[in-house]
Image (tube, rainbow, N blue to C red):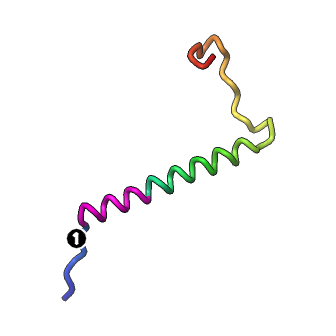
């Protein structure tokens, strides 16, 4: 009977790094794709008086 797989700290770090890279890449790809949508599908800009820190 084979030994069960026991992940090490090094394995966990590699897996978490891969997940982080994939999520970051997916965010930027989707962000770029959303920016190219027609104007009617763009998210509305908040009013300046509601978000003064964005001026």
Q: Is residue 39 magenta?
A: no
Q: From this view, report whether residue 41 is shown above or below residue 5.
A: above
The secondary structure that most of the magenta stretch takes on is helix
Q: Residue at x 22, y 77 (%)?
A: 4
Left or right, 49 with respect to 19, comes to right
How many numbered marks are there?
1
Give the quadrant of residue 54.
top right
Tell me where residue 47 appears, x and y as whole percent. 67, 17
Q: Residue at x 76, y 43 (%)?
A: 37
Q: From this view, report whether residue 32 is shown above or below residue 15.
A: above
Judging depth in this view, the residue of 12 and 1 nearest the camera is 12
| Residue range of the region highlighted in magenta in the rendering | 8-18
- Check disc 1 and report its element: helix, strand or loop: loop
Tell me where residue 17 appears, x and y as whole percent. 40, 56
Left or right, 50 with respect to 22, comes to right
The residue most toward the bottom is: 1
Q: From this view, report whether residue 54 is shown above or below residue 14.
A: above
Tell me where residue 24 appears, x and y as whole percent. 52, 50
Give the quadrant of residue 31.
top right
Left or right, 16 with respect to 47, comes to left
The residue most toward the top is: 49
Q: Residue at x 63, y 51 (%)?
A: 29
Give the quadrant of residue 38.
top right
Q: Is residue 17 magenta?
A: yes
Q: Which quarter of the figure is the C terminus placed in?
A: top right
Density class for disc 1 (Cα within 10 Å; few <14, some 14-19, many ≥20) is few
Q: Which quarter of the figure is the N terminus placed in?
A: bottom left
Q: Residue at x 57, y 48 (%)?
A: 27
Circle 1 is placed at which residue position? Answer: 6
Left or right, 2 with respect to 49, comes to left
């Amino acid at each position: 009977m084979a030994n069960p797989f026991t992940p090490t700290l090094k394995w966990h770090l590699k897996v978490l790094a891969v997940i982080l890279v994939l999520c970051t890449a997916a965010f930027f790809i989707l962000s770029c794709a959303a920016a190219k949508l027609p104007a009617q599908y763009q998210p509305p800009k908040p009013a300046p008086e509601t978000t003064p820190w964005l001026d």
